[in-house]
Image (tube, rainbow, N blue to C red):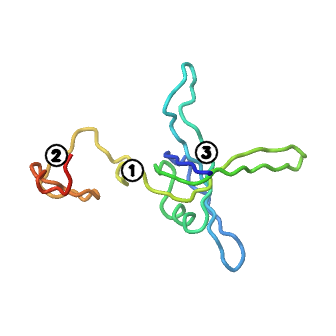
Amino acid sequence: MNKVILMGRLTRDPEVRYSTGDNATAIARFSLAVDRRFRRGGDGAEADFFNCTAFGKQGEFVEKYLKKGTKILLSGRIQNDNYTNRDGQKVQAVQIIAEELEFAESKNASSGSARSEAPERTSAPVNDGFMNLPDNGDEELPFNF
């Protein structure tokens, strides 16, 4: 089994090109910075950087919606890119082939528009993708804890 799941931010805007031929396919390349969960004493590295590639519809999604700093959740597979360069030296590289991509934060959070002070409460519903539940509505929920 070859499966990898990463959450991180794009380190630069993606590079997208299309294959030649009758059925042009999007090929998007980008780099993902993934924070390390644990740090070693004295080790200055706090993130790992992964080269990623997305093909087809995923590549088109990357081209249309992702940019430097966007936080995403990626699942895919690891692929070796071993080759011999023009000088006859063996080059070993690894890349992540993206199979599924999702946003890992809201658009407002990634654009840096969050304010430092607490927002005022209003009675208008917030359209953040979550349903507002009443404070005392435990009896109406279809499950109990």
Q: Is residue 142 left or right of residue 98?
A: left
Q: Which residue in the protein does label 3 denote?
A: 50
The residue furthest front is 144
Looking at the rendered structure, the kind of residue marked 2 is: Glu
Circles 1 and 3: CB distance less than 8 Å?
no
Q: Which residue in the protein does label 2 denote?
A: 120
Mark 1 nearby-residue class (10 Å; few <14, some 14–19, many ≥20): few
Is 27 situated above or below 38?
below
Q: Name the residue: 48% across, 61% down.
A: 65
Secondary structure at numbered mark 2: loop
Q: Name the residue: 16% across, 46% down.
A: 120
Is 5 situated above or below 53?
above
The percent coordinates of residue 9 (x first, y second) are 50, 46
Q: Depth check: give the residue in front, 141 or 18.
A: 141
The residue furthest left is 136
Marks 2, 3: nearer the viewer = 3
Label 1 or label 3, whichever comes before in sequence order: 3
Looking at the rendered structure, the kind of residue marked 3 is: Phe
Q: Name the residue: 87% across, 43% down.
A: 89
Q: Which residue in the protein does label 1 denote?
A: 105
Q: Is residue 128 left or right of residue 19?
A: left
Count the marks. Answer: 3
